[in-house]
Image (spheres, rainbow, N blue to C red):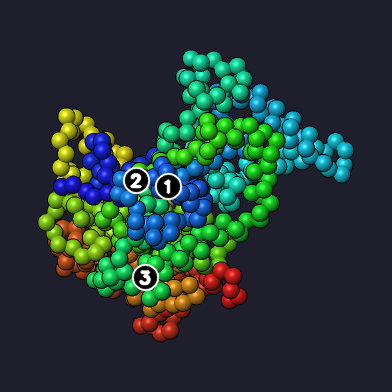
Amino acid sequence: MFCETFPVTPDREENPAILLFGNRLFNDQSATELLVELLLVINSRKRIGKTGAPLASPLPEVKALLDWPHDEKLHYAPKARLNLKLFAFMGASRLDSRHQTHREHYKELLEKLQATIRVAEIGSENEALRTLGNLFLGFQGAGSGRTWCAQSFLPICPGLLAGETIWSESVARRTAPTDWSDLMLDKSDCFASNKHLFLARGGELLYLQLCNALRQKPATIKRWIEESDVSIEPTEQDPVRLHAELQRALTRLLDQCPRTVSELADFVDSGVDPDTSGKTDTDADGDPRYVTAEWCAEESWQEGYLFAVDLLRLCTADLDVIERLLLLEAACGMQVLRSLAAQSARHSSSEREVTWPGYRLAVSAPDEDNSAVKRISRHTAKVAEKLIYHAIRSVDVALPERDKLLREADRRYGGKLFTGMAKRIGLLVPRRGAAVRFTLNERLLRLLVVTTVPVGGRLTYDRFKLLVESRHGLVFDTDGFARASKWADGIERIFLGNSIDTWLQDMLAAAGLLIHLSDACALVVNPAAKRGVES
């Protein structure tokens, strides 16, 4: 079995999981870093191919997507923001990671910033500087235990979006740089921006899934929607219209945070020391320094289309800025799970016939005490990992060290990634130990409502459950558990009673997302209004 890829077929790739799922979804990349990398690509200057025209918009235009040359990759130009990271994270980084050149430049940076500060009370410049440092430290996102340059900010505004930079202590010992200017030389490898250790290309892959989905033919989209019963709104079924709406929504996604924060970030990073940003963000010719994105599975456009709809609904709902980021982060994690499971269902060696999305995950209450319910939920977790295991082994490649590469695929890019990400976002519990089962926390519940129920609209409770099943493979009630049991081991006749999903109704009601019309009918509501529109 060979997997077609978008936008380019890899020339040399031996890992079967990367060939199957794309380059790459990686176990060490957190949901926060997925979102950071996705927004980094969205907000950076881009081009298709090394000689393509620069793109300033979040997404390439529809014509560019349709005419994308199959042998050209996406390139984007993220800012390193080393000065800003040094200013914000130096004091919160490990002592053994602070090279002497870092300390000296940090001191120089503080002196330059202090010289630019004007306050009414003489002698308060240091206090103002500490306040500014605490402001940016408060936006610390991922990597608190790492070297200062390998940490990430919460992507709350464009000025806090920064690419990954890795400090190499071994190279520093070998080259013995004497000052910061030595580190900025083109020949210096002390700072590396191409390692992809933490921003490990997962966000790039999610972005490519969006591009891949939005270049599909409208007739193809419509036929799939009808067959899969994902029930997307009529205005979202046309990929051209969805592209236009998503383009507008992503353009204004990070505008909730006051512009002053981005302006301060830009000033700290390049206002007092433009030389550093000039050398890290541009090449020897003064052109933007581009990073090359890789590929996703071409047939994953269904997952990509659903992700595009999820992003649009999250961007257009009138949510608090932090809540939106948290839900976007959870959405990225859920998209990784959906991508792994749906693609595995297409290529697993199993002969079971299943309908879209090809898998069923039985979700139990957070405090579930029904042993039969927990047993089925645990079983679907095991079978999901097994599904991915078999799919990876369906990739037909001749490998000299096949067993070793397969073990690496399982541990870093396959089943362990699925369970690890599910645990991080709260879909699998417990975080440690065996006998894991699926459940929901308040954030995931909110995400499912905002992305399933139209903004400001409502659905019947039963219809809501069916749509969540068709979009994420999650089931909650007796009928859903029967379908999950049939998918897992072919046994459909189970007896669990008619109230195993009462906990879900209680969670929805406690969050103000459920209206009981009668004992037999309830409505799930999405109370969020459209952004910019009074409720």
Tell me, yes or no, if residue 505 can be seen here. Answer: no
Front residue of 162/434: it is: 162
Front residue of 219/428: it is: 219
**Could you give the CA–CA distance between mark 3 and mark 1, rounded to whole angstroms?**
27 Å
Amino acid type assigned to the residue bearing label 1 in the image: Gly
The percent position of residue 31, horizontal first and vertical second, equals: 44, 48
Secondary structure under tag 2 reads loop
Q: Are marks 2 and 3 in contact (CB under 8 Å)?
A: no
The answer to whether 404 appears left or right of 239 in the picture is left
**Could you give the CA–CA distance between mark 2 and mark 3, rounded to whole angstroms?**
26 Å
The quadrant the C terminus occupies is: bottom right
The percent position of residue 240, horizontal first and vertical second, equals: 39, 67
The percent position of residue 361, horizontal first and vertical second, equals: 28, 59
Q: Are marks 1 and 2 in contact (CB under 8 Å)?
A: yes
Front residue of 273/139: it is: 273
Q: Which residue is mark 3?
A: 238
Amino acid type assigned to the residue bearing label 3 in the image: Asp
At 37% from the left edge and 57% from the top edge, which residue is drawn? 65
How many residues crowd around disc 3 within 10 Å: few (fewer than 14), some, or many (20 or more)? some
At 42% from the left edge and 64% from the top edge, which residue is drawn? 243
Relative to residue 53, is residue 274 depicted above or below?
A: above
**Could you give the CA–CA distance between mark 1 and mark 2, rounded to whole angstroms?**
9 Å
Q: Earlier in the sequence, mark 3 or mark 1?
A: 1
Q: Residue furthest left?
A: 351
At 24% from the left edge and 64% from the top edge, which residue is drawn? 356
Q: Which residue is mark 2?
A: 72
Residue 52's mark? 1
